[in-house]
């Protein structure tokens, strides 16, 4: 498949880099007593949220209704509305 064959919009990720970045964040927090709850607005992608949860994030933070809906519709395990 060529890049010109992809429907847009689409998300293209370097999974090795994504996994490395997630591991780096988890490593920074290891032993600090601080838990990671990344924000859904950054990737807007349930598959990335799942990678973060599988790596040890305790949940996914959402801020707006559409993020909540997308997280719930994709069975993202934990969501927590951000207090504003």
Image: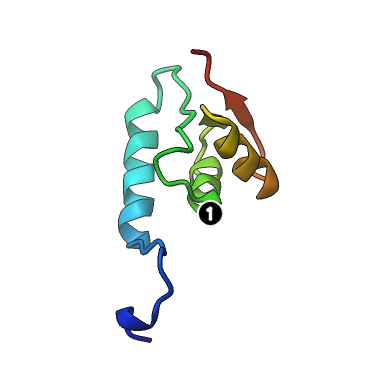
In this rendering, is residue 11 above or below 56?
A: below
Which corner quadrant of the image does residue 81 belong to?
top right
Q: Which residue is mark 1?
A: 47
Instruction: Name the foreground residue: 12 vs 55.
Output: 12
Q: Residue at x 33, y 50 (%)?
A: 20
Q: Residue at x 38, y 86 (%)?
A: 1
| Badge count | 1
In this rendering, is residue 36 above or below 66?
A: above
Q: Residue at x 55, y 50 (%)?
A: 46
Rendered location of residue 37, percent (x, y): 49, 28
Local SS, label 1: helix
In this rendering, is residue 79 above or below 74?
A: above
Rendered location of residue 14, percent (x, y): 32, 62
Asked if residue 61 lies left or right of residue 24, the reply is: right
Residue reaching furthest top?
84
Q: Residue at x 55, y 38 (%)?
A: 67
Instruction: Name the foreground residue: 60 vs 81.
Output: 81
Rendered location of residue 62, percent (x, y): 53, 30
Query: How many other residues sit within 10 Å of disc 1, few (<14), some (14-19) or many (≥20)?
Result: few
In this rendering, is residue 7 above or below 32?
A: below
Residue reaching furthest bottom?
1
Instruction: Name the foreground residue: 4 vs 58.
Output: 4
Rendered location of residue 35, percent (x, y): 48, 23
Asked if residue 20 lies left or right of residue 65, the reply is: left
Question: Colour scheme in the image?
Answer: rainbow
């Amino acid at each position: 498949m060529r890049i010109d064959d992809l429907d847009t919009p689409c998300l293209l990720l370097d999974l090795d880099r994504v996994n490395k970045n997630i591991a780096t964040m988890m490593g920074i927090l290891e032993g600090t007593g601080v838990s990671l709850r990344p924000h859904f607005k950054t990737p807007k992608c349930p598959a990335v949220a799942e990678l973060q949860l599988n790596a040890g994030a305790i949940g996914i933070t959402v801020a707006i209704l559409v993020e909540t809906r997308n997280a719930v519709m994709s069975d993202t395990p934990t969501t927590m509305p951000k207090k504003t």
